[in-house]
Image: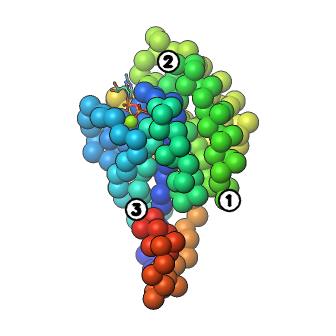
Amino acid sequence: MDLTWNYNFNILFIGDSEVGKTSFINRFVDEELDQPYPACMDFKTSGIEVDEKVINLRLWDASGLKRYRQVVLPLYRCVQGICFIYDITDVDSFQEVTRLYEECTKRLSKPVPKILIGNKADLESLREVSYSEGLKLAGSFKMQFIETSAKTGAGVDEAVEMIARKIPPRPRLLKSFEGKNTKKNALRCQLM
Ligand SMILES: Nc1nc2c(ncn2[C@@H]2O[C@H](COP(=O)(O)OP(=O)(O)OP(=O)(O)O)[C@@H](O)[C@H]2O)c(=O)[nH]1
Ligand SMILES: [Mg+2]
């Protein structure tokens, strides 16, 4: 691996409450569907190999509960990729994607790669949002789209690889922070 490039990516998962963000991350990192517990913000780390490069991922899990909406706002400035998630059996969660997209567009200091994930694809008989509606919304925001099931694991690895592939590696910055022990630099180093 070329050590002049930084392959540590922070990826934020946002979406309405109960769409399966925590379950999705648990499935990807631990390969199981632990019963999720409520937390306003959490992350898990994992590595994947893409095109012979090992990419270290920090997967940020933001609660979709309205009372925690403010907690995620500072993260918009620090992440390299965003996954918007909705539940294919819940049309309200699909509509929430547009609100979150607009909020995040206002807050981002620069554009970052984003994808749209329709989760709970195993619950076909309860489907309220068609595949083509998901695809159309993603297209209108110029994002890639995938349906997944955190329950069965279908599409989960593919979704993470999809977003990881879209994030360009950054030049390593740690050297330039040496000797500059400011609060701002400490935060930036933590998120690298
Ligand atoms: N059938 C099915 N159930 C799922 C799937 N993903 C999550 N669930 C279930 O949906 C419920 C909510 O999942 P969570 O992972 O807690 O959802 P969340 O988006 O993290 O919710 P908040 O933390 O409140 O924002 C749990 O009971 C999960 O077991 C899935 O793909 N299929
Ligand atoms: Mg959760």
Q: Furthest-top residue in view?
A: 125
- Quarter location, residue 169: bottom right
Q: Amino acid at mark 1?
A: Lys
**Residue placed at 28% from the left, 42% from the top?**
31
Vertical relation: 39 (above or below) 191: above
Q: Is residue 189 visible?
A: no
Residue sitting at x 45%, y 42%: 62
Mark 1 and 2 residues: CB-CB less than 8 Å, in contact?
no
Does label 2 point to a residue whose CB lies under 8 Å from ligand 1?
no
Location of residue 108 in the rendering, given as x and y in whole percent from the top left corner: 65, 54
Q: CA distance from mark 3 to mark 2?
A: 32 Å
Label 2: which residue? 89
Q: Earlier in the sequence, mark 1 or mark 2?
A: 2
Q: Nearer the viewer, residue 37 or 21?
A: 37
Residue drawn at 70 percent across, 48 percent down: 106
Residue 130 visible? The answer is yes
Q: Secondary structure at mark 3?
A: strand
The residue singled out by tag 3 in the image is: 56
Chain-order first, disc 3 or disc 1: 3
Asked if residue 141 lies left or right of residue 4, the reply is: right
- Counting other residues with Cα less than 10 Å from the Cα at mark 3, is it few (<14), some (14-19), or many (20 or more)? some
Task: Identify the residue position indicated by label 1 in the image.
Answer: 110
Q: Does 172 sit left or right of 143 as displayed?
A: left
